[in-house]
Amino acid sequence: MNPPTQHNRPQLPDHFPNGQMPKWNAPLLNIALVIGIGVLSTVILSSTASVLQPFAISVFFVYLVFPLVRILSRHRCPKLVAYIIATTTFFIALYVLGYMMALNLQTFVEQIPMYAVKINAAFAYLEQISERWGVLDSGETLTFRDLVMALPEGALANWIGDSTTSFMNFAGNLVLIAFFMLFILLEVERLPERIQLAYGLTRARVVTDLIQDINKSVEQYIILKVVVSLVTAVLSIIVMASFGLNLFFLWGVLVFVLNFIPYFGSIVATVLPTLMALLQFDSGWSALGLGALLTLLQNGIGNVLEPAWQGRNLNLSPLLILVALTFWGWLWGVVGMLLAVPIMVSIRIVFEHFPTLRPYAILMSNASGLDNAEHKRIEELQQKDQRRRFTRE
């Protein structure tokens, strides 16, 4: 069979320009690739949640434990012993915290009959107001059960069930988390040697410097976030104790945990103690005063102190934060909502340290074109890039 010549070669359809086959549109191909990777990652994260959740929590805890390891190492404590002491101390603190919370919950259960009486009295008062304004007909009653039934079917039960399941999973995975932490700490110690063996001395120095910069930024964010949450919780405990609120330690722990959930967490951490005060105190003004002080405390620390301490580390777009809370909450429940912002901040910090990914880090931020601090931050990163290129060459 003769090969096709210029005369007998098949002609391409007219809609192919210049008689050439069309090329792939690079932007569309990149978008399709990103969507495919996102869907695949979501499936993997969902199907392996029982393993990845404890691992993510253990990585978060390692950043909290590592400063104690460094302190012990400075006092000539062997690294393995320092890891064991730091991890053991951390979990003893968790156990003491859990034990005190259990005592507070036991006290709450014992006081439920007293609160039930006050709840019934409050609903009787609401009935009078509702009848006066014509919301209820004469003789109709309003009970707590009516409010629960007004919620979407199964909403309250699902919320309580999800929260309880997340807490029980966390408690049941403590041993696995401890093992993850110990092995992560051991791997961190050996990683520089393996990098040097894999890349050679010159390139290994560049890689290790980059990893150290990323770890330093992530560690700084996590530790400062924990410190800010702890300060908020301690001050809230002092305020609630001064008002004589019952279970103030339990509410303080709740403030500490919910402070990791932006926007919604601070609202819930303020509303719940205020509702408790309405049940406990005879005067509604005391409860409103407590709620006002807790709100002032949350806004003062969240809008003034935390940005000053954190600097540019928590410079995330508010829309991105809401999307992250929704996505990780849907994917991993309460644990996902608590880890959503630390995960997104860590991703942004990693993106910042790679020139090709830095534009995405800027898009993830809440910076504007007039943000001098963000310009300074980018210049510092570019100077580090130049030093790394000089070292590599």
Image: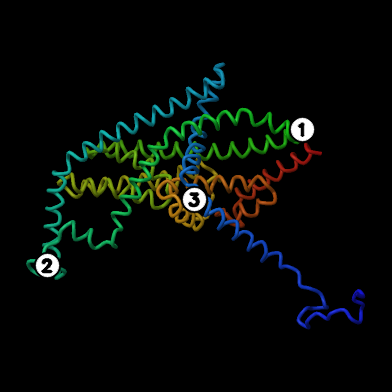
- Crowd band around label 2 with a 10 angstrom C-alpha radius: few (<14), some (14–19), many (20+): few
The C terminus: image quadrant? top right
The N terminus: image quadrant? bottom right
Marks 2 and 3 in Cβ contact (< 8 Å): no
Q: Position of residue 54 (x, y in %)?
A: 47, 40
- Crowd band around label 1 with a 10 angstrom C-alpha radius: few (<14), some (14–19), many (20+): few
For label 2, the residue is: 132
- The type of residue carrying mark 1 is Gly
Marks 1 and 2 in Cβ contact (< 8 Å): no
Q: Position of residue 43 (x, y in %)?
A: 52, 54
**Of pointers 3 and 1, the one earlier in the residue sequence:** 3
- Between circles 1 and 2, the one closer to the viewer is 1
- Please tell me the numbered disc located at residue 47: 3
Height in image: 51 above or below 141? above
Q: CA distance from mark 2 to mark 3?
A: 54 Å
Q: Secondary structure at mark 2?
A: helix
**Of pointers 2 and 3, the one earlier in the residue sequence:** 3
The answer to whether 98 appears left or right of 314 in the picture is left
- Between circles 3 and 1, the one closer to the viewer is 3
Can you name the residue that lies furthest to the top here? 76
**Image point 56% across, 53% down: which residue?**
41
- The type of residue carrying mark 3 is Ser
Q: Foreground: 168 or 304?
A: 168
- The type of residue carrying mark 2 is Arg
For label 1, the residue is: 200
Can you name the residue that lies furthest to the left here? 139
Q: Secondary structure at mark 3?
A: helix
Q: Foreground: 32 or 266?
A: 32
The answer to whether 136 appears left or right of 332 in the picture is left
